[in-house]
């Protein structure tokens, strides 16, 4: 990492920015100071205000107070619009990249700058030449006529960055990235971080919002930490530890906030049939998956993108019917059973796409938390009082931060939404819990709460199967990890000696014949 002098000039400063949404204070006199040519990490737990600050800087929402300084320009934060932010040289790439998979790289780039035309006709050769020059400038391994849908995830993000910065000269713009790696596998995340580090070394100023502490510590020069809408730490040219950052985010040292230690050994369980057994399971990319999980055991699934991790969970849960093979639950053949039947048999699934498949954002926390147990409250009418009391107790047990159980779920941070989803399933006391990317886009504090809940469930005898692209997560949480290669279980790695680096190495190997 190239050292940046502490006296490097400030190119972006947000001073005493405040923002309220109804009764909720999102930002309270929050500040940010960014030095030229640095990667500046903006950190905080879900709901800390970091994304709200970026939205205020982008002019997406209007701040209630504060000042934004870019270079020599001073702008009241209340008057900052999207157009003014662009004029000031602020460029944004959000988690939703805004790219169209069915269009080529050149066409996606042109959506941001316009298509060159002559006599009302698009000059395709001119466009492709311009985009090829841009791709070379940003060292992006793609061709101008390649459909964006055919690109690797990290390359897609780089295309979005190039589109945002295509009109800048001499790296004068400030690039602000909101969770650019939230949905990327580790290998893709490393590729993107290396590219950002090269851009910073060439003089580009970058503000990075990310929950992935390991990557942040590898690339960032400076750090700002928000908590509950307030600035709580500002570190310039510093080398903090992960624990120091976590404690600043959490507000106090918390055992759960640390890199979670592996859970204690589960209580002794009388020898019985395994909770889950799959034999020769064929579905999608799976070509013959053999798997067995005992009561109280936490097993991880690791593999490259497209290895079949999510397919395995969905097939067990009944979301898709296998082409061949068998699924057994507690010794009973349940192959091809419906999701309704699997739920009745004690199986629960927390899916990868929380917003698309797991929550109803227009409904309240109470309503979302009760979806899995509606029969407890419906007696010809909903017993709302009892439902409300139970939800308050559930929110407290799972440390869900919400102003009220009647708050719309959409108003909660991603981490708190995920805890509601997990709590909703665990209140059914499942015998098998399936978790697909359970902490994707979740901050380190909420992640620790989710780990605690999963460990507690396993300690009570629940079998847990986790599909995750976060190898640190698998190494910290699992009793063993099964590596998928060529659609099969290539190997099982026990907890002893299990590390993220080892999983990275094993998943990159050629498939091992069974």
Image: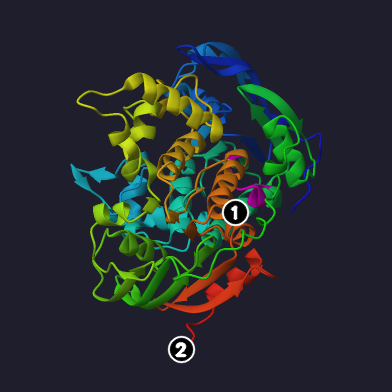
Percent position of residue 446, x then y: 58, 39
> In this figure, which colouring scheme has been used for the structure?
rainbow
Residue 79 included in the magenta stretch of the image: no
Percent position of residue 366, x then y: 38, 27
Direction from residue 93 to residue 370 in the image, left or right: left
Q: Nearer the viewer, residue 34 or 402?
A: 402
Direction from residue 359 to residue 39 in the image, left or right: right
Query: Magenta segment range?
Result: 208-216
Helix, strand or loop for disc 2:
loop
Circle 1 residues within 10 Å: few <14, some 14–19, many ≥20: some
What residue is disc 1 on?
Answer: 193
Q: Quadrant of the N terminus?
A: bottom right
Please report whichever mark, 2 or 1, sits nearer to the chain's N-terminal start.
Answer: 1
What's the residue at 73%, 36% (across, down)?
Answer: 247
Q: Nearer the viewer, residue 106 or 119?
A: 106
Report the mark closest to the observer, 2 or 1.
Answer: 2
Which of the 4 quarters of the picture holds residue 453? top right
Residue 513: mark in rendering = 2
Kindly give the residue lying farthest to the front in the view shown: 270
Percent position of residue 5, x then y: 81, 41
Image vertical order of residue 456 relative to residue 142, above or below: above
Question: CA separation, marks 2 and 1?
Answer: 34 Å
């Amino acid at each position: 990492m190239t050292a940046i002098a502490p006296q490097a000039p400030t190119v972006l400063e947000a001073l005493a920015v405040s923002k309220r949404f109804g009764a909720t204070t999102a930002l309270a006199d929050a500040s940010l100071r960014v030095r030229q040519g640095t990667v500046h990490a903006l950190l905080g737990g879900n709901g800390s205000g970091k994304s709200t600050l970026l939205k205020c800087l982008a002019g997406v929402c209007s701040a209630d107070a504060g000042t934004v300084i870019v270079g020599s320009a001073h702008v009241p934060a209340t008057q900052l619009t999207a157009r003014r932010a662009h004029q000031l040289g602020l460029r944004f790439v959000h988690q939703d990249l805004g790219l169209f998979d069915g269009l080529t790289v050149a066409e996606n780039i042109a959506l941001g700058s316009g298509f060159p035309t002559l006599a009302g006709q698009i000059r395709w050769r001119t466009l492709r030449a311009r985009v090829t020059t841009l791709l070379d400038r940003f060292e992006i391994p793609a061709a101008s006529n390649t459909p964006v849908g055919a690109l690797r995830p990290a390359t897609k993000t780089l295309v979005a960055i190039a589109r945002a910065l295509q009109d800048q000269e001499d790296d004068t713009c400030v690039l602000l990235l909101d969770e650019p790696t939230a949905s990327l596998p580790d290998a893709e995340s490393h590729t993107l971080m290396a590219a950002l580090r090269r851009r910073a070394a060439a003089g580009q100023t970058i503000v990075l919002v990310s929950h992935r502490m390991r990557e942040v510590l590898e690339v960032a020069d400076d750090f700002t930490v928000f908590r509950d809408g307030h600035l709580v730490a500002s570190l310039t040219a510093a080398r903090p530890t992960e624990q120091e950052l976590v404690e600043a985010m959490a507000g106090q040292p918390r055992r759960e906030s640390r890199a979670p230690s592996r859970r204690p050994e589960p209580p002794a369980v009388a020898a019985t049939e395994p909770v889950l057994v799959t034999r020769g399971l064929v579905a999608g990319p799976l070509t013959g998956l053999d798997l067995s999980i005992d009561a109280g055991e936490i097993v991880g699934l690791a593999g490259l993108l497209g290895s079949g991790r999510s397919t395995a969970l969905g097939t067990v849960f009944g979301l898709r019917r296998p082409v061949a093979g068998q699924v057994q639950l507690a010794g009973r053949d349940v192959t091809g059973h419906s999701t309704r039947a699997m739920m009745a048999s004690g199986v629960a699934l927390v899916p990868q796409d929380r917003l698309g498949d797991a929550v109803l954002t227009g409904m309240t926390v109470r309503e979302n938390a009760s979806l899995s147990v509606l029969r407890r409250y419906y007696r010809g009418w909903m017993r709302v009082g009892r439902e409300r009391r139970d939800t308050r107790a559930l929110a407290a047990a799972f440390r869900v931060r919400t102003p009220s159980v009647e708050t719309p779920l959409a108003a909660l941070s991603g981490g708190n939404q995920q805890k509601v989803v997990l709590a909703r399933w665990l209140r059914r006391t499942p015998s098998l819990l399936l978790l697909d990317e359970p902490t994707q886009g979740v901050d380190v504090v909420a992640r620790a709460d989710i780990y605690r809940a999963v460990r507690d469930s396993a300690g009570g005898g629940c079998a847990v199967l986790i599909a995750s692209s976060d190898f640190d997560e698998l190494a910290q949480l699992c009793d063993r990890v099964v590596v998928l290669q060529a659609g099969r279980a290539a190997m099982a790695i026990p907890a002893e000696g299990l590390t993220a680096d080892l999983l990275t190495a094993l998943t990159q190997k050629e498939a091992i014949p069974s």
